[in-house]
Amino acid sequence: MKVLGFNSIPINTTLSSLSHFQLFHFPPLHNPSSSNNFTISGRKKLVLRAQNLGYKSEEQPVIDLMDSEKEVMELNRNLYQNIEPYGTGFLKVSDIHTIYWEQSGNPSGHPVVFLHGGPGGGTAPSNRRFFDPDFYRIILFDQRGSGKSTPHACLEENTTQHLIDDIEKLREHLEIPEWQVFGGSWGSTLALAYSQAHPDKVTGMVLRGIFLVRKKEIDWFYEGGAAAIYPDAWEPFRDLIPENERGSFLHAYKKRLNSDDLETQTPCIYQVLVCWE
């Protein structure tokens, strides 16, 4: 299995039980069935191509540009065309939860499952455009409480382990022996967790916008660190909470998100989702 990361992080600290994984810097929208090249820091060129639905890599020397100011990373930044699903459905995964799923692209292609962010972000039609529809069988689904899944915004029986189990149930429901896992933001954490639980079902991983839900990341995101960069987004998030509860925005929002009063709960759901956008 290969791990293809878009962020440079010490991934070995997260995947202690997956020491056989390899981390590559990979252009976000690269089609692994092609042989497009890209340059990292002007020093090496990494050629990636699909081979028997796996990946083969070669390193080739290129001109050293470190002494110049012309270092560039040649990436394919174009999304694929808009496509429509060829199949959709709902899968009951517990007595409470039913998840929405869809398939698009090539029904006989290499399966890839897209794990959205949030938690609670849901999928969007644009998510299909990350993948070459001629090469991939593209599976999107809304995690518990998200998007078209029901009941909406329900936190009961909604943990990381529940979501891992749901991914497996969906794979079995769609009769897919193994698949590639593509996750962004919170979805990168879920991709890692799922792959640790079911390494024999994962052909490879693509992680983008990596967010590992560590305490320091949560504190930076929800307790004021992000305010210095995104003050316009931070102010309404802050102002929804009374001043006497701003010692911990995380606890203040948790209390409101678990409220039985929809007038209290709904604005908080909106603010959390806006932050993740």
Image: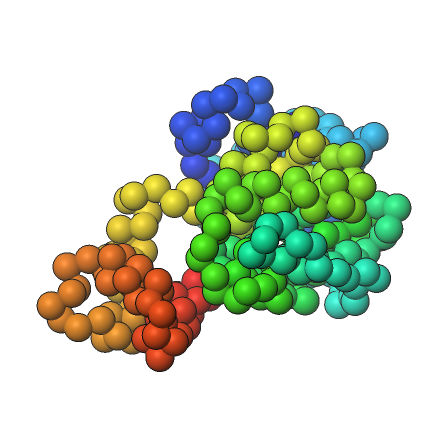
Viewer-side residue, 163 vs 43: 163
Observer-nearest of 254 and 22: 254
- Judging depth in this view, the residue of 239 and 40 nearest the camera is 239
Colour style of the rendered protein structure: rainbow
Horizontal relation, residue 172 to residue 273: left or right: right
Decide if residue 212 is on the left or right side of residue 148: left
In the image, farthest residue toward the front: 95
Q: Is residue 208 visible?
A: no
Q: Nearer the viewer, residue 111 or 165?
A: 165
Q: Is residue 171 visible?
A: yes
**Residue positioned 72% across, 52% down in the render:** 139
- Residue 103 vertical placement versus 112 (above, below): below
Residue shown at the point (57%, 37%) measured from the top left = 194
Q: Is residue 95 left or right of residue 52?
A: left
**Viewport quadrant of the N terminus:** top right
Does 187 sit left or right of 276 as displayed? right
251 is higher (above) or lower (below) than 61: below
Residue at 24%, 62% (x, y): give it.
252
Residue plotted at (75% across, 52% down): 138
Residue at the bottom extreme, as displayed:
263
Q: Position of residue 213 (x, y in %)?
A: 38, 45
| Image coords of residue 45 (percent x, y) | 63, 35
Residue 115: percent from left, percent from top: 59, 50
